[in-house]
Amino acid sequence: MTFARQVIEPGGWRRPGLPLSPAIRAGEFVFLSGMTATDPTTGAPARGAVTAETRQILTNMGELLKAAGSSLAKVVKVNALIYSMLEYENMNSVYREFFPVDPPARTVCGAGLIGGHKVEIECVALA
Amino acid sequence: MTEGVERSVIEPVNPKFNVSRNVNLPHSPGIRVGDYIFLSGMGPVDPVSGGRNLGPIAEQIRQTLRNMAHMLESAGSGLDRIVKMTVVLADAGDYDEMNRVWREFFPVDPPARTACALQLSNGNGVEIECIALAGKSPAQGI
């Protein structure tokens, strides 16, 4: 059996203008690109505190997953990058609100991020 | 895969390895979906005390891989079922040492792997995550 490979682009979202797709659905899985805090309709960065960026990212992630027929509750694995591990608990405090029960498997690391962002999050979800 | 694939939480038999529960972090040790197991990043947690074994990097890596074996075996899988791993080192200078330990654990047909150096939590020198196939390998009699 061959799975279709489908690009996921929510209606009304501005294309990133980068050589990547927001998400690809393949079989029963959806693979999301790393997301930073952005106003999805204008594409403008929404930089702020780690808590605010985390909230914006996970809100957008929920919308993107919905466009793929999935949802935050169906996320399997998350990779989160933050600019400093000193902000780990600040990220977690908002993250908990979005994944209150049986949260996804996850890895969090501190890294140098692109574009002055403090948080970047990617995930794999069930479609 | 078929419609209606289940998403279930994987937990270690040894509760000391259930770091997210023990220190109340918002992740699950692992998630199984269909034929795949996705594990969270694991570190050198001591199986008896639940604390961190922050000794020489080779020992940290061995401890982490033993813990990963335990986590996978708790879910009916094993190290030989790993498809893809990501290794994060706190110090890129430990790369050669990591590879030496890797050959001890994966002497034949090792998994696909990405390694990089990033900031880690809890003073860990290493953190390792993986995607594995669920179930035993056919050689082990399914």
Image (spheres, coloured by chain):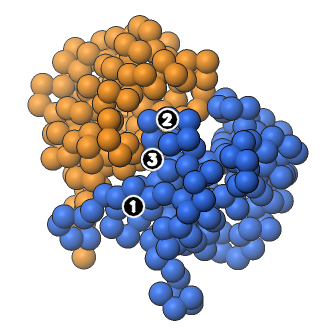
Q: Is A1 left or right of A80, judged from the image as shown?
A: left
The residue under the point 32% across, 35% down is: A100
Question: What's the residue type where badge 2 is placed?
Answer: Leu
Residue located farthest toward the left when viewing the structure as drawn:
A11
User: Quadrant location of the N terminus of chain B?
Assistant: bottom left
Q: Which residue is mark 1?
A: B32
Q: Give the number of the mark in front: 1 or 2.
A: 2
Q: Is A33 left or right of B13, judged from the image as shown?
A: left
What percent of the width, then of the height, locates residue B28? 45, 47
Q: Which chain is blue?
A: B
Task: Check if mark 1 and mark 3 are on a common chain.
Answer: yes
**CB within 8 Å, label 1 to label 3:** no
Q: Which chain is orange?
A: A
**CB within 8 Å, label 1 to label 2:** no
Mark positioned earlier in the residue sequence (1 or 2): 2
- Secondary structure found at label 1: strand
Question: What's the residue type where badge 3 is placed?
Answer: Ser
Question: What's the residue type where badge 1 is placed?
Answer: Arg
Give the spatial CA distance, label 1 vs label 2.
19 Å
| Relative vertical location of residue B30 with respect to residue A94 in this rendering, above or below | below
The residue under the point 17% across, 66% down is: B3
Is disc 2 surrounded by few (<14), some (14 to 19) or many (20+) residues within 10 Å? some
What percent of the width, then of the height, locates residue B14? 60, 59
Give the spatial CA distance, label 1 vs label 3.
11 Å
| Relative vertical location of residue B102 with respect to residue A97 in this rendering, above or below | below
Q: Which residue is mark 3?
A: B28
Q: Quadrant of residue B34?
A: bottom left
| Relative vertical location of residue A9 with respect to residue B63 in this rendering, above or below | above
Residue located farthest toward the right when viewing the structure as drawn:
B56
